[in-house]
Each structure stands twice: as structure tokens, then as C-alpha cells.
Amino acid sequence: MDLIIEPHSSISGEIRVPGDKSISHRAVMCASLASGTSKIKGFLESEDCLATIEAFKCLGIKIRKENDVLEIKGNGIIGLQKYNRPINLKNSGTSMRLISGILAGQNFSSVLIGDKSLNLRPMKRIISPLNKMGFSITASDEGTPPLRIYPVEKARAIEYVLPIASAQIKSCLMFASLFAEGETKLTENFITRDHTERMFKTFGISLHVKKTNLKKTIVVKPPIKLDPCNIEISGDFSSASFFILAALISPNSDLLIKSVGINPTRTALLVALKEMGANISIENHSNAYEPTADIRIKYSRLKGIQLNPAVVPNLIDELPVLFIAAAIAQGKTKIRGAEELRHKESDRLEAMAKSLNSFGVKFKLFKDGIDIEGFGQDNENPFKSAEIDSYGDHRIAMASIIGSLRSKGACTVKNCTNISTSFPGFVELSNKLGMGITKV
Ligand code: S3P
């Protein structure tokens, strides 16, 4: 699916975005391992999260939806059932990496596969520590899927310092540690999203977390069982970020996004944008197992910044949004420490560089980042009318679509089907706000 986008200003009104993707995955996983029925409200019905649901259905878990609430009948920590065919996790790296940690501890073998993009993504990062724990898991010679997981007699707890800032690796190992003998100690030198820690506590798993400045150590004690629970999932900050950008760069905008997750390990984009001069305020703050608030955004004149590399893990999925903001801002924005962007659904540094190039933006690309020379906002529509390939990557597609609002004429963004992996209804919601997006 390709999309044609007309330039548009004044993104105003009140919207809600669908539920958080990371939290939705973890809620289904923990609920499936719990002893009893959990209820989940606000679950994100995107392709990625549905892949997680399908996987657990294959593994014998009863999941049904009633009045917008997902009911999951957990079967206990080692209560999953063998599935005799490969489990297809489609485009979802989170599903594959986290479920590997769960399946490593079951008493049957499994095979995990994905789509073309997922089958090219690096898996040695989970295989190596899982093997250290005594689990048996293999990938292709290139370290990519299919993953083959075999049962083991027993696994042991390890002390492990994460070599890459990745919540997926951390979470895979946290799940695996439920099946290991002893207390697993995981240390991050850069703090990543902490949804698994919060979800584990919600399901009654005993966790000890020690934080010092940027460093964090998590100690997981294997539980006898997980307590089922009722969970409400708020809007996904990553999805909201596209509309935050739209309102910020579109003259006369005043937008309220209701009930968005504002977990500080996810919202470094807000800090960066405020440093750039963004008029963003947080209203109606509430604090359950995850903090939630309404976010109000007004059109702002932005200036370039030098991003602190230490916060990159806390805005990793929002970097394409930041790139577009930087291209509109006055002056230069420097971003480093973002090499992980090259290992997402596409090489996002390369894909965004191509997108910026089509818009006529000046930049210099580095192995781990980019310098972007912003146009400034004297000209309301500084971008060239462009044809952009999203490379089948949802976040490249949505960031480029929003960038197109500030172009001199209609833009085409190609290969947009995968928007539904994280944000079903994105085009419809955009059009409700007055944007002119047509599917071709
Ligand atoms: C995610 C972690 C991040 C993020 C991804 C979702 C998660 O990936 O990019 O979209 O839910 O744990 P990494 O763990 O690879 O950094």
C-alpha cells in the first residue's frame, strides 16, 4: 500500500492513540504463564501483538475477547503445550526475543520463524546469554531465525552485564530466569524501558532493583507461580509521538492526546523536544503500575540541539520523529550513539537519511548517528514534494508521512502496509484531524 499526503496545517482537537505495544506483549506473556485468568483492557490489536496472541494460542493458552477485554487463562509457568509446527512471529522482534526466553524453559522443543524482515534480524544477542544459562537454542550460521529451542534438564542463574542497550535482550533473560536455578543478576549500563520489571511486579514476581545514576542491576528470584491480574493499558507513547510531531511543526496547532503512557524510560523524546523549544505540557497525571497522562502540544518554533547519547535507549523508537523535527528546526541537530537503529525493522539510519534526502534536507550520516541541518520555520513548507520508500518499516512510514505535511506539494510514501504492525487506524485518525492522506 502506498499513501499520498497533501500538505496541511493546524493539527488541533482531542485524540486517543491505541494501547502500548511493548506493554501489550508483556501482558499477554505474563498472563499466559500465570496460574488463573487475567483480564487485559486496552490491549493493542496490531499485527505484532496479534502475533504474540497467536503464538500463545498455538502453545495451548485459551485467549478470548469479550467487550473489549482480553481474557487469558494462564496455565502456570511450565504449563505451555508443544506446538508441532514452526511458530510464526511475522514482523515482531519483541515477540521472538521475549518468547524465546519463555520457551527455553519449557519441557518441549519449538521452532520460531518470522517474515522476511524478522528473518534477517540479529538473534545471537539472546542466544549467547541463554546458552550461558544452560539453555539450548540455535539460529542460522548468520545468527538469524529460524530459532530452534530444545528442552534442557536444568538451567542456572547467571550474572550478566548487557553488552547492548536493549530491553528485548533484558526481557528475554528476565523471562528465562524464571526457569533457572538461583537468582539471575542482570546489569544495564544504559537504562532501557522497564515495562518487564513493572509487569513482573504486577504479576507478583519478586524483583530486586538497584539503580545508580545510569546503571541498573535487576535480580530475579524464580517464583513458584505468577498471580493472575487485571490490567489496563494506556496509549502508546511511540504512536503518540507522530501526532506530537504533527502538531509541533504545523502552524496554528493545539492538540490534546488523552491517556498516554509516560513511563520515563520511554519519554526522552519529550525532554529533547522541550530543549528544542517545544510547547508541550503534561496534564492529568496518574500513576498505576505505569504512569499515564494527557499530553498537550502547540505549534512551536524549534531550534537544533546536541542529543545526549545516554538517553538514546529511551527514545530509540522515536528517533525518526526527532529527525523530522530537527529538519524543521533552526540550526543543526547532532545525534550519536544510535547504531542500534541499524538493526530495527529496517536500517532506520539509512532509511531516514533517504527520506530526508528526498525532502531536500541537508545532513551528514555517521555509523552511529546523524547531523541534520534544519531549515528553520520562516518558510512554512520547506520540504520538497517527495516520493519516499518506507522500506516496509512502520516508523519510517509514519515519520515520513508527518514530514510530508510541511512539503511544498503532495508527497508519496511507499510500502505502508506495515503501519498496522504497531498503529492500526493511523491513516483514519490522521484524516479525522484534517490531514489529506489517500491510499493508492
Ligand atoms: C522493545 C524494545 C526496543 C524497541 C522495540 C520494542 C520492547 O528494542 O526498539 O520497538 O518492547 O522491549 P531493543 O530491545 O532492541 O532496543
Image: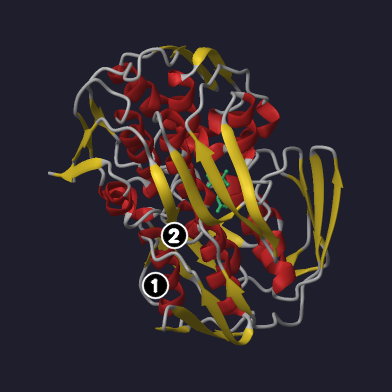
Would you place residue 298 above or below residue 62 in this image? above
> From where the camera sits, is residue 107 visible?
no
Q: What amino acid type is highlighted by mark number 1? A: Glu
User: Within 10 Å of the Cα at label 1, are there few (<14), some (14-19), or many (20+) other Cα atoms?
Assistant: some
Disc 1 beta carbon < 8 A from ligand 1?
Answer: no
Secondary structure under the numbered disc 1 in the rendered image: helix
Please give left or right for residue 127 compared with residue 211 in the image: left
Q: Position of residue 95 (x, y in %)?
A: 48, 60
Q: Position of residue 20 (x, y in %)?
A: 51, 58
Q: Position of residue 215 (x, y in %)?
A: 81, 40
| Circle nearer the N terminus (2, 1) | 2
From the viewer's side, name the closer residue of 21 and 256.
256
Q: Which of the image's four quarters has the C terminus? A: top left
User: Within 10 Å of the Cα at label 2, are there few (<14), some (14-19), or many (20+) other Cα atoms?
Assistant: many
- Residue ID at (61%, 55%): 293
From the viewer's side, name the closer residue of 391 and 256.
256
Secondary structure under the numbered disc 2 in the rendered image: loop
**The disc label shown at residue 18, or none:** 2
Would you place residue 361 above or below residue 411 in this image? above
Q: Position of residue 323 (x, y in %)?
A: 47, 26
Please give left or right for residue 416 compared with residue 201 in the image: left
Q: Which residue is mark 1?
A: 54
View extreme (front): residue: 252
Please give left or right for residue 160 compared with residue 40 in the image: right
Would you place residue 300 above or below residue 220 in this image? above
- Residue ID at (41%, 49%): 13
View extreme (bottom): residue: 36
Name the image quarter holding residue 398. top left
Quick check: marks 2 and 1 in contact, CB under 8 Å? no
Q: What amino acid type is highlighted by mark number 2? A: Pro
Name the image quarter holding residue 335. top right
